[in-house]
Image (cartoon, helix red, strand yellow):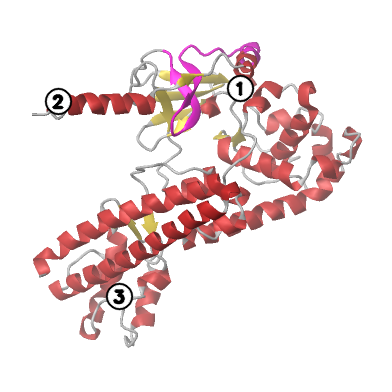
């Protein structure tokens, strides 16, 4: 046997790989983190478990200083450290918010405060926190239109809705922002520009934790559940971990406990929820590689793409699927086509003489081997269509990376999304092939 080919060598290589992936470079010595730690200490928080570090793949995050046990408290951040609408209404903006009609939304109040404090620079009481916030974001609303055009269709549609929502948020904020002119020597239009409010909007939407606040008359009735949590928001997401996170009304702290252990000097993660990659990109601006919740969505037009156009009952079948909520959330995942997708296809594949059995299909019953086979064949054709489309998009992205060097980071993000979807589709194709074996 050649050296390095045995079982022991493979185990050693796997351990080295895991170590290299999880090993972070300590960043606690950097001035911005020294200042942040001092600022947090003044607000009665001093962490003993975690330190800031830079990790390959995820970038800046928090590293464990010691081994963490299952159920151990990771962070307990006092309410005095949280930036909420209470912070804003108690500030110099409070009087302007109180007299403005109609009342501004909690989101607008927070965004206005962030922009104002960032503009204040060294004079801001929140400067140590503002200094460690990202200077830019990679949510779809921040990406160039030609990059968004490369998204899968369902994500592209949601990205366009997001952009329209942010533009409306900016337009509707103009009158309130103008009322703040007495606070500034410069023109408020230059301070609260679209790019400034976009940065604040992304900060709140990607980094805020959920904390319920009492409803205030000076704010609109929209959900008032945002809280920016300095230091805590350095924790990165992993779909493979479980944590318990909530505001503790007794201790008046936002607390996170790990549901699994963590070794010394490893990155500590939290989980934002069981989100697929399209949602992670839309809401947070990143992709999670090997995400167990990742999937490829099948739209209505693709669902019927390979069904016979001569089927006179097709419109009725589509209507039944819509009435019973079987036209949305149809997906391919790591474990193949979803039950919902196969169920929808089996109903669509019913022959005229079988049509009266549609209720049994929705209940998960098998009508006939022929119907089962038809559903699997159509699923295979849809999967193959997606594989070809995905490969074509990856070639297009690769070409654009050569042509549009300035967009290389944005294009790499899209490339990662399509690459993950291709892996899912290839896994689904193999599973579908095995499922069809009994019918051959």
Residue 301, x across and y down, in percent:
42, 73
Q: Helix, strand or loop at disc 1?
A: helix
The answer, for residue 248, to whether it is visible in the render is no
The answer to whether the residues at label 3 and label 1 have Cβ atoms under 8 Å apart is no
Cα separation, mark 2 vs mark 1, equals 58 Å
Q: Residue at x 49, y 26 (%)?
A: 61
Residue located beneath label 2 in the image: 3
Q: Helix, strand or loop at disc 2?
A: loop
| Residue 212 sits inside the magenta stretch | no
User: For this rendering, which residue is in front, 130 or 372?
Assistant: 130
If you read the primary sequence from the N terminus, does the residue marked by circle 2 or circle 1 appear first?
A: 2
Q: Which quadrant holds the N terminus? A: top left
Residue 306, x across and y down, in percent:
32, 76
Categorize mark 3 by other alpha carbons within 10 Å: few (<14), some (14-19), many (20+): many
Residue 183, x across and y down, in percent:
88, 33
| Side of 32 relative to 306 (left or right) | right
Which residue range is magenta in the image? Answer: 38-65
As drawn, the label of residue 79 is: 1
Report which quarter residue 290 is drawn in: top left
| Residue 47 sits inside the magenta stretch | yes
User: For this rendering, which residue is in front, 157 or 86?
Assistant: 157
Count of numbered circles in the view: 3
Residue located beneath label 3 in the image: 348
Q: Which quadrant holds the C terminus? A: bottom left
| Side of 188 relative to 361 (left or right) | right
Q: Residue at x 18, y 25 (%)?
A: 9
Query: Which residue sits furthest front?
Result: 2
Categorize mark 2 by other alpha carbons within 10 Å: few (<14), some (14-19), many (20+): few
Q: Residue at x 76, y 45 (%)?
A: 103
If you read the primary sequence from the N terminus, does the residue marked by circle 2 or circle 3 appear first?
A: 2
């Amino acid at each position: 046997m050649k050296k390095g080919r045995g079982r022991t060598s493979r185990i050693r290589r796997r351990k080295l790989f895991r170590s290299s992936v999880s090993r972070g470079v300590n960043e606690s010595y950097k001035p911005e983190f020294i200042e942040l730690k001092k600022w947090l200490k003044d607000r009665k928080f001093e962490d003993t478990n975690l330190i800031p570090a830079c990790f390959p793949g995820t970038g800046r995050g928090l590293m464990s200083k010691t081994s963490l046990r299952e159920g151990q408290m990771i962070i307990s951040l006092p309410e005095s450290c949280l930036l909420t609408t209470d912070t804003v209404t108690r500030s110099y903006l409070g009087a302007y918010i109180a007299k403005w009609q109609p009342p501004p939304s909690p989101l607008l109040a927070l965004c206005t405060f962030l922009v104002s404090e960032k503009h204040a620079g060294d004079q801001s009481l929140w400067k140590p926190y503002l200094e460690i916030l990202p200077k830019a974001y990679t949510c779809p609303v921040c990406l160039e239109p030609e990059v968004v055009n490369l998204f899968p269709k369902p994500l592209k549609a949601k990205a366009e809705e997001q952009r329209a929502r942010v533009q409306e948020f900016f337009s509707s904020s103009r009158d309130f922002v103008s009322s703040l002119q007495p606070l500034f020597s410069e023109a408020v239009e230059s301070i609260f520009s679209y790019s400034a409010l976009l940065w604040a909007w992304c900060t709140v939407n990607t980094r805020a934790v959920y904390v319920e606040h009492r409803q205030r008359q000076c704010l609109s009735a929209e959900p008032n559940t945002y809280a920016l949590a300095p230091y805590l928001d350095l924790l990165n997401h992993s779909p493979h971990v479980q944590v318990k996170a909530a505001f503790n009304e007794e201790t008046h702290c936002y607390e996170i406990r790990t549901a699994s252990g963590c070794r010394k000097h490893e990155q500590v993660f939290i989980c934002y929820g069981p989100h697929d990659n399209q949602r992670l990109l839309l809401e947070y601006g990143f992709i999670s590689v090997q995400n167990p919740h990742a999937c490829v969505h099948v739209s209505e037009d693709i669902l019927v793409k390979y069904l016979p156009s001569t089927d006179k009952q097709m419109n009725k079948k589509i209507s039944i699927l819509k009435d019973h909520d079987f036209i949305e959330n149809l997906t391919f995942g790591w474990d193949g086509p979803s039950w919902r997708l196969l169920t929808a296809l089996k109903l669509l594949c019913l022959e005229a003489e079988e049509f009266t059995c549609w209720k049994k299909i929705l209940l998960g019953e098998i009508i006939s081997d022929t119907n089962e086979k038809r559903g699997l064949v159509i699923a295979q054709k849809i999967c193959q269509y997606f594989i070809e489309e995905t490969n074509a998009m990856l070639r297009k992205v690769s070409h654009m990376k050569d042509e549009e060097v300035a967009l290389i980071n944005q294009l790499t993000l899209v490339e990662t999304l399509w690459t993950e979807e291709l892996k899912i589709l290839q896994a689904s194709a193999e599973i579908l092939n095995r499922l069809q074996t009994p019918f051959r």
